[in-house]
Image: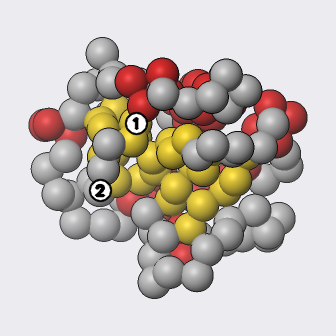
Amino acid sequence: MPDLSHFDRLDDHVAPIAHAVYDLVAEVDPSLHRMKRWNFPGFVANSTIVTVCGQPNYVNLQFFYGAHLPNPQGLLEGTGKDLRHIKFRSMPDIAREGVREVILAAIEYDKTLRDEGLRAKADK
């Protein structure tokens, strides 16, 4: 059973968004393993693919190798070497064009990475 306790600490208007973003990733690829990473609910395969990070007024879907992903809709934000995120401020943001495609691209990119052995430690 995945540890979603992080969502319990979020404000009432942010928690449903966090759950919906988490559910979206699970729906896009049900075979992903679930694992808490840096205290945030996340999804792993060869490496950490994404985590769902609730903030006071929004939710970030953090892509650990987001800088290497296509971003035709301009959804990915951030300037780090690898990390990028998509920000969700409301439920309609989840249905934006391109969100699913970025998630799928992250899953595909993960297949090119060295297997860190996370699946064996995950909740699946």
Q: Disc 1 to disc 2, how far (Cα)?
A: 14 Å
Amino acid type, label 1: Pro
Specify few, some or many for label 2: CA neighbours under 10 Å numbering under 14, 14-19, or 20 or more: many
Q: Position of residue 79 (x, y in %)?
A: 58, 81
Q: Position of residue 9 (x, y in %)?
A: 48, 28
Is residue 20 among what the camera can see? Answer: no
Q: Position of residue 36 (x, y in %)?
A: 30, 38
Q: Quarter of the image containing the N terminus?
A: top left
Residue at x-position 30% and y-position 67%: 113
Q: Quarter of the image containing the C terminus?
A: top left
Residue at x-position 51% and y-position 42%: 52
Q: Position of residue 112 (x, y in %)?
A: 35, 67
Q: How is the image coloured?
A: secondary structure
Of the residues under marks 1 and 2, which one precedes in the sequence? 1
The dot on residue 47 is 2
Amino acid type, label 2: Ser
Instruction: Name the residue tied to disc 1.
Output: 41
Residue 121's place in the image compared with 5, above or below, is: below
- Horizontally, residue 92 falls left or right of residue 103, namely right
